[in-house]
């Protein structure tokens, strides 16, 4: 029985094997057939294509020649584009085509360009323009910088009512000569220039022309239309005085907004309607938040001394203020230096600007000021200041600015000099706005020709005819030193600064030596004894404790969640 079962099992296994082999053979045969069919199909296609190509070549030989020429044509086009690009690059420095004019706002609400070249200006050759730029250490950069400078008031084509405020001046200052054509053509501009260069009129006159072309301010067409933002009350008041004088002759109203005084009068003036607002960032932001000032119709914005505003922590406020103006506003940004923070702001808000640099865009002192630095013992300063005033202020009529570092020091030096018989007055942050304004007016009029000031007045205080600046205390930064001594030697005049430098000021010695050398000034041997090493610029928040830190980066406030751990 067992043998029978084994024989049956063997037969079944053999049958299964034969069946599997048969299936494998069938599958292989099917694959071979498909492959042959595919190969023959491919061959047929190739023959068909070859036949078609031969037929086309025989029937249309002209078309073939055109097809062959196409790559050559494309190459020629590329060469043309390359040539055109070179032409565009050359055009930026070629003044033969005349000034580029910015188109009006897309919504049609205001016009931007109002400039026409005068006859003498239009006749200027490229070489004459280059000579003017070289003589004034001026560099123009940006797209379509086709703007010849206006060298005389006679050749300015603006309406005479806008130019009345320039009576008494012989010729425009270099920054006015170059900025008027650019700003009046509707372009955004970055002006890098030393203090006292006449930049207020450089932006004020084209700005007034810009807003005068718009509908009269009324409830239907509310103002303001022009906004000037300045870092200090003194600079805001100074710019406001210039704009107010020029605006009155054209029927344009302006207001100066700053802190330290009640808001009611400022709010009323804004309600009544004004064309121009000149303001400090803090008070302006307050009025915007209180909905007393609407900037949505502002089409001409000026940031004056922008580097100072950012240094003093107003960057967030400035961004908020600009964002509230008309989206197609024209912006004029003026600064004494060109740090990364200003570059970032300009890149974000300005559209295709023209940059005008007079001198260096690095920190530089005015070349019109003779700088005298005297290394002195701290306790000898009182007697030495008295002796210098006898030398510099013998007439007791010429204007002298004496700078100190602290508010209490200002009060002490004021008392000390008054006790020694000098007629002087002090201004600082603890004096109220009325006292400060009165002191500045007395100094301007010559009633009190000796003014003692902290750095609150070092920037933006534009008083003509300041012959001497005395630095009783050296400032905390080299930037403040430059702005202090810039109060003299303004408007092309010459001036003298005399600075006391004590052992306590040693960390600033290297920077001061470099600045004196850059300005071709005498460097006293006693100053170099402190060393010429320049301390790495510290961040105001981070300090110099951390390595490889970006000094332009703002400090971040860290908060911790409350937990039970």
Image: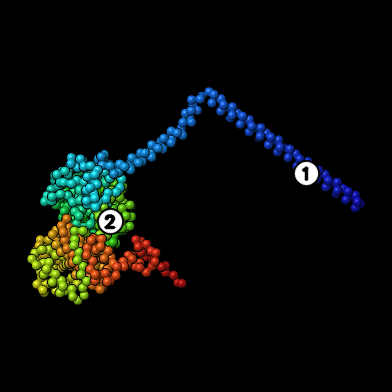
Disc 1 designates what residue?
20
Per the image, label 2 sits on a secondary structure element best described as loop
Q: Nearer the viewer, residue 375 or 274?
A: 375
Q: Kindly identify the residue that appears in the image at 11 percent across and 70 percent down.
A: 390
Q: Kindly identify the residue that appears in the image at 27 percent across and 56 percent down.
A: 360
Q: Position of residue 309 (x, y in %)?
A: 26, 59
User: Residue lying furthest bottom in this view?
Assistant: 379
Viewer-nearest of labels 1 and 2?
2
Q: Is residue 197 left or right of residue 349?
A: left
Q: Kindly identify the residue that appears in the image at 48 percent across and 28 percent down.
A: 65
Disc 2 designates what residue?
361
User: In this figure, which colouring scheme has been used for the structure?
Assistant: rainbow
Q: Mark 1 vs mark 2: which is more N-terminal?
A: 1
Q: Classify mark 1: residues with Cα within 10 Å, few (<14), some (14-19) or many (20+).
A: few
Q: Nearer the viewer, residue 551 or 231?
A: 551
Q: Position of residue 6 (x, y in %)?
A: 88, 50
Q: Kindly identify the residue that appears in the image at 42 percent across and 69 percent down.
A: 562
């Amino acid at each position: 029985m067992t043998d029978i079962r084994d024989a049956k099992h063997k037969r079944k296994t053999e049958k299964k094997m034969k069946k599997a082999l048969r299936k494998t053979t069938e599958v292989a045969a099917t694959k071979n057939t498909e492959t042959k069919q595919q190969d023959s199909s491919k061959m047929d296609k190739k023959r068909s294509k070859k036949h078609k190509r031969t037929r086309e070549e025989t029937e249309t030989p002209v078309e073939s020649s055109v097809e062959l020429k196409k790559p050559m044509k494309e190459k020629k086009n590329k060469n043309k584009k390359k040539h055109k690009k070179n032409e565009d690059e050359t055009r930026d420095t070629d003044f033969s085509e005349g000034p580029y004019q910015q188109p009006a706002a897309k919504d049609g609400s205001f016009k931007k360009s109002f400039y026409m070249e005068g006859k003498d200006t239009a006749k200027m050759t490229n070489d004459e323009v280059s000579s003017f730029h070289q003589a004034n250490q001026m560099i123009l950069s940006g797209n379509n910088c086709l703007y010849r400078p206006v060298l005389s008031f006679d050749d300015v084509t603006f309406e005479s009512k806008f130019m009345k405020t320039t009576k008494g001046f012989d010729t425009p200052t270099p920054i006015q000569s170059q900025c008027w054509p650019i700003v009046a053509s509707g372009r955004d501009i970055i002006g890098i220039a030393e203090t006292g260069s006449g930049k207020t009129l450089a932006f004020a006159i084209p700005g007034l022309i810009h807003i005068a072309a718009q509908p009269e301010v009324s409830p239907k067409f509310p103002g303001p239309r022009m906004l000037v933002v300045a870092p200090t009350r003194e600079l805001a008041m100074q710019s406001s005085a210039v704009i107010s004088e020029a605006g009155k002759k054209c029927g344009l109203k302006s207001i100066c907004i700053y802190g330290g005084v009640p808001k009611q009068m400022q709010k009323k003036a804004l309600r009544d309607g004004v064309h121009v607002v000149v303001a400090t960032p803090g008070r302006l932001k307050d009025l915007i938040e209180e909905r007393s000032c609407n900037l949505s119709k502002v089409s001409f914005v000026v940031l004056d001394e922008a580097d100072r505003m950012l240094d003093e922590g107003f960057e967030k406020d400035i961004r908020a203020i600009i964002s509230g103006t008309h989206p197609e506003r024209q912006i004029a940004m003026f600064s004494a230096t060109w740090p990364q923070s200003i570059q970032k702001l300009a890149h974000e808000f300005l559209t295709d600007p023209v940059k005008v640099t007079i001198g260096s865009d690095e920190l530089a002192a005015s070349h019109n000021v003779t700088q005298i630095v005297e290394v002195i013992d701290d306790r000898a300063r009182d007697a030495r200041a008295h002796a210098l005033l006898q030398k510099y202020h013998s007439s007791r009529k010429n204007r002298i600015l004496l700078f100190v570092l602290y508010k209490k020091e200002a009060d002490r030096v004021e008392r000390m000099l008054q006790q020694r018989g000098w007629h002087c007055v002090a201004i600082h942050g603890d004096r109220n706005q009325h006292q400060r304004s009165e002191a500045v007016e007395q100094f301007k009029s010559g009633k009190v020709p000796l003014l003692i000031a902290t750095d609150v007045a070092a920037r933006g205080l534009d008083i003509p005819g300041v012959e001497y600046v005395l630095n009783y205390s050296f400032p905390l930064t080299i930037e403040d030193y430059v702005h202090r001594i810039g109060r003299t030697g303004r408007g092309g005049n010459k001036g003298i600064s005399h600075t006391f430098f004590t052992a306590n000021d040693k960390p600033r010695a290297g920077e001061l030596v470099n600045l004196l050398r850059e300005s071709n000034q005498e460097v006293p041997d006693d100053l170099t004894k402190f060393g010429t090493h320049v301390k790495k610029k510290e961040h105001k928040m981070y300090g110099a404790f951390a390595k490889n830190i970006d000094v332009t980066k703002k400090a971040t406030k860290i908060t911790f969640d409350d937990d039970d751990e």
